[in-house]
Image (cartoon, rainbow, N blue to C red):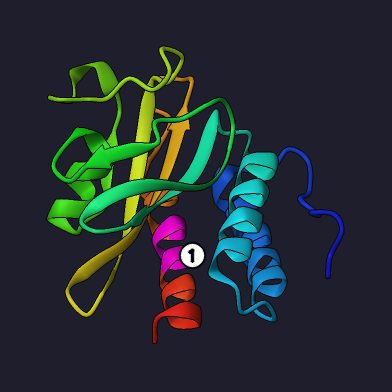
């Protein structure tokens, strides 16, 4: 297993994702445990891209329950339809929120979070997980983040749910 992440300094975010995703896949592919893989994916995303908070919430009995994450303390349970995570899980679509203060029903786990992207993993019509990434900068996420994070979640889906 790799012991370090190799990202060329000074890359654009898109180029950094292009270097990072194959490394995440190489680390998680041989491991069969979902929780271990989510933990490594969260760590690699946070370390490489410098996000404020990166983590996963799992759907346990129709409630989002905190899974592996990197960053400050987080909300432990989120009801479906509550906050950005719950909305993405319910709608089964990625949500990019440029300013979390303007999102109706936003759950403020940290006042330092300014923008957010949440990517659900849907299998057989059920949201199984959401990847939640927070930034301490306004409007920090774009279609580039959405494309690459959706690609990561598709890989996790193939590895663990198909």
Whether residue 4 sits left or right of residue 152 in the image: it is right
Q: Is residue 153 left or right of residue 13?
A: left
Residue indicated by mark 1 = 152
Q: Name the foreground residue: 109 vs 149.
A: 109
Query: Which residue corresponds to the image point at 59% horizontal and 31% vertical from the top-left?
Result: 71
- At horizontal 15% and vertical 25% (from top left) the residue drawn is 105
Q: Secondary structure at mark 1?
A: helix
| Residue 109 spot, x, y in % from top left | 38, 22
Magenta extent: 148-153
Residue 150 among those drawn in magenta: yes
Q: Residue at x 70, y 81 (%)?
A: 30
Q: Look at the image and tell me in which quarter the C terminus lies.
A: bottom left
Q: Along the horizontal axis of the image, is 111 left or right of 48?
A: left
Whether the magenta-drawn stretch holds residue 104 is answered as no
Q: Compared with residue 91, is residue 84 higher up or lower down, i.e. above or below?
A: above
Residue at figure coordinates x 78%, y 48% from the top left: 8
Give the x, y percent position of residue 91. Answer: 13, 54
What secondary structure do most residues of the magenta stretch adopt? helix
Question: Which residue is farthest bottom?
Answer: 162
């Amino acid at each position: 297993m790799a012991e370090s992440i190799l990202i060329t300094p000074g890359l654009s975010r898109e180029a950094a994702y292009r270097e990072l995703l194959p490394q995440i896949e190489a680390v998680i592919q041989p491991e069969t445990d979902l929780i271990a893989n989510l933990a490594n994916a969260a760590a690699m995303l946070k370390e490489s891209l410098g996000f404020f908070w990166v983590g996963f919430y799992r759907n346990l009995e129709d409630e989002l329950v905190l899974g592996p994450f990197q960053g400050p303390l987080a909300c432990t349970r989120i009801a479906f339809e509550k906050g950005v995570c719950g909305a993405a899980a319910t709608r089964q679509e990625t949500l990019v929120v440029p300013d979390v203060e303007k999102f109706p029903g936003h759950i403020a786990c940290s006042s330092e979070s300014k923008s957010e992207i949440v990517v659900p993993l849907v299998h057989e019509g059920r949201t199984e997980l959401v990847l939640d990434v927070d930034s301490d900068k306004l409007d920090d996420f774009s279609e580039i983040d959405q494309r690459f994070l959706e690609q990561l979640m598709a890989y996790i889906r193939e590895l663990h749910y198909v």
